[in-house]
Image: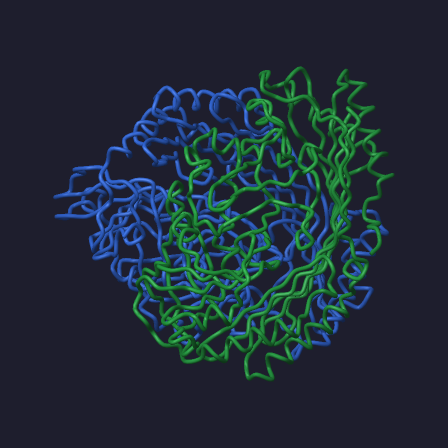
Amino acid sequence: MNRSELLTQECCHDVFEQALRAARARGVPDFEVTLRAHAAALTRFANNVIHQNVAESMVELEVRPVIGQRTARAATNRLDRGSIESLVEQAIALARAMEPDPALPPLAEHAPIAAVNRYFDSTARCSPAGRAACVAEAIGAVREAGHTAAGIYSTGESVEALLNSNGAFAFHGQTMAVFSITALGETSSGWAKGSAPDRNALDPVGLARRAAVKATKSARPREVPPGRYAVVLEPSAVLDLTGSLFADFSATSIEDRRSFLTGRMGAQLFGANITIVDDVFHPLQDGAPFDGEGAPRMPLTLVDGGAPKEIAYSRRAALRARVAPTGHGFPLPNEAGEAPQNVVFQGGDATLDGMIASTPRGILVSRLWYIREVDPYEKIMTGMTRDGTFLVENGEIVAGLRNFRFNQGLIDLLRNVESMSPSVRASGEESADMVVPAMKAGDFHFTELTRF
Amino acid sequence: MRELALQALDAAVSLGASYADVRVAHVRNRALSTKNGRVGRVAAAESTGAGIRVVASGAWGFAASDDLTPAGLNAAARLAVDIARAGAAAAHAEVVLAPQDAHVAEWVSPCRIDPFSVSVETQLAELLRVDAGLRANPGVTLAEASMEFTRDHQVFVSSLGSVIDQTRTLSGAGYTAHSFQDDEIQQRSYPNSFGGQHQLKGYELIEELGLADNAARVAEEAVALHYAPQCPQGRFHLILGSGQLALQIHESIGHPIELDRVLGSEANYAGMSFLTLDKLNRLRYASEIVNVVCDARPEHGPGLGTFAFDDEGVPSQCAPIVTAGLFTGYMTSRETAASIGAARSNGTMRASGWNRIPLIRMTNVSLQPGAQPLDEVFDVDRAIYMETNRSWSIDDKRYNFQFGCEIAWEIRNGKRIRMLKNPTYSGISTEFWNSCDAIAGPRHWTLWGVPNCGKGQPEQVIGTGHGASPARFRDVAIGGAYA
């Protein structure tokens, strides 16, 4: 491991001092500064060749004055003295245009924040040639299986810092590598994806082979009628389907009566085998150990034995509820309040093969796509299967299937979970990465078929 | 900005790029919102940077940086060329681009009232007036309203000799009344969901929308939905309001006609398309009354996809997509046009910002107005009329879709007889469009803005335009989501 050179702590302090001086010169002593920087590169391939190959680097400075219970936010990506002065002036003018907000919390006090190191030099320094070599090898694995490859390999680093005139200072730097690949056959496809702060923890060729096997096994897909089936959901499908639950574990969302937990906290909503926590320090998680106001993230038990137990509180929501903030607030001012960011499901001890073997008739789902909320209180979600959907009969995968549309209530789904694998870090396209198991569940509602 | 762009272009060419283009942009944004009587968000942002795209050793490379010093631009140009050369090792054929003339031009989108000249106090006061109007109804449990303004000034230069300076001003506003009652959440939005209406206009758009004038009706409908019967399940004639139809066009025509998607570039993420090359000029996409164009020209209207030149220097055009029901065209770039033997790109390459590479994106993909008066569209024994999107989903080849709307009414003999809640409908794209049997005329045609279209890796979110007037479809599957 090493440290990012994108934005040093010294640079953050220097920018903060410049902004604070500019604010004080305008009669504003209460002031918050957020700095973010990232450098990322992505190599994209399709039809077995690299067709897009990009890199970007940028920095962003956000300032927030607090003037007698008024606040506003302004941002720029210019860090020269004149731009900082102009930004501070603009933010102060915006804040002064507001009506006072009696519920606005004062700036956060300094609080100790436990360090978490997610920076890997091997990821930050990965060259275009390094990515191209991995991509070439992965394409080769898919071609060997007689399929065509498409996918991405990205590597990058990011830094986030928050400082305020109350002495708060929070700083986090990390790296992230993502590899995903689709193997395209004539009548089928397969997909696999992985992400990790350390690129050496990824196995692009292994992912390529997994995608290729799915494409091979799902060739010449059969058609079975829509209906209610037992399903085995691979971790990426669990991630993308359940990810939309967690914005509702928010004090503000419940107060606004837009959360499905409104009136349901403590109820036995899900099966007794469902326990879910939010834990930024989990070894498979990523992200900063502080929130948008600089408050340290605290662990939460969101669901305990099937009952929703704890929710996230921003400093503002905590003040109203007279509880301690949990460190999940979004940068102020905002409407949404707060949300869990580092979800971890407590998994089980089943294996994917075991779940399949114990299924007399059911459907194995590799990936779900275009998932949207149909009903906000019952949490009915719709979406499609994609890139590897299989018929299971008498404990064995017997055929690939044409893809389905589903309309499935998430509360019902988590009531019907029969078994789970150990949790893994899962990556999808519809939700931020989480730590989730594969799940076997009964009575999953597929409502229509598509044409492939 | 012009000098910076030319300097970066020189650097890229001198490093060996056989083709290069550079976009230097300055983007300014203001976002305001209110929630339940208080200000929710007040934010201003500015961003300046350069994106350098090159072909070197026959392959693409792109690098973006906000370091606009000579050293920063040179470093970005070098990185773009290095990336291209690294990618060339895994490329089987050299990039070939359709021919394109050089253009030297300056264009500023029409903007009667500069939204940044209107005070934040005035804008917040308008939102709070809407908020009060919504919450005057005691059944409204959450009132949310927002406005957003963007000015995007970009200079494009290319090694073909183009120097194009464009400034686009975009405005948007809207609101939603939520009502929670008896374990049910209902909502109504105005003038559309997902932030309302968005167009290439100044603050005059906000004045035209009549936001506060509609608040009482919107609040009343949100609450009334709790007492409405569930939308029935079955096959019915369906009439769609133009706001919902705009999203239907977006998902089931706009995305499938992206030629990069057809050719496989998006296979790993956004997916591919059922519109394989053999279907061009052969597929009966829709009924004979359906005509769809992809039109970025200013004369099409102030859409989110309106401009003078796209982000690879191609002039805006009107491309026929569906002509009297026949599939007649894709959206193309210089590279994809060349790959199918087209004479030139039809100008749909757009980047979400200076830091991202241009991709084929919808400009304004619009259903041309029909011939029928609105009364005739509704003149049917029985139908379901739906308005304002609540959920949307479509498969990765764009066949099977399902949409949910905020509200519906049952139509009998041309009249609305009762409100229905939780309406959804689903279908297969071509079957659905072939069932279209009535489209209202130009008086009812609106050019809607969809501000949140995502595509590409890294993902780029961009605004698109879709003109539509209310239309009728026969024998559509309705209500399946709640079955």
Name the residue: 60% across, 19% down.
A98
* The one of A72 and A317 positioned closer to us in this rendering: A317
Q: Please tell me whether residue A212 is drawn above or below residue B154 in the rendered image.
A: below
* The one of B269 and B69 positioned closer to us in this rendering: B269
Total labels: the figure holds 0
Q: Quadrant of the N terminus of chain B?
A: top right
Residue B381 in the figure: left or right of residue B256: left
Q: Quadrant of residue A41?
A: bottom right
Q: Please tell me whether residue A183 is drawn above or below residue B113 in the rendered image.
A: below
* Picture colour for chain A: green
Residue B459 lies, in percent from the top left, at: 59, 55
Name the residue: 73% across, 63% down.
A199
Residue B199 lies, in percent from the top left, at: 48, 40
Q: Please tell me whether residue A113 is drawn above or below residue A403 in the rendered image.
A: above
* The one of A130 and A308 positioned closer to us in this rendering: A308
Q: Quadrant of residue B58?
A: bottom right
Which chain is blue in the rendering? B
Q: Quadrant of residue A328?
A: top right
Residue A404 lies, in percent from the top left, at: 37, 64
* The one of A211 and A24 positioned closer to us in this rendering: A211
Colouring chosen for the image of the structure: by chain
Residue A58 in the figure: left or right of residue B321: right
Q: Please tell me whether residue A144 is drawn above or below residue B32 in the rendered image.
A: below
Residue B10 lies, in percent from the top left, at: 80, 59
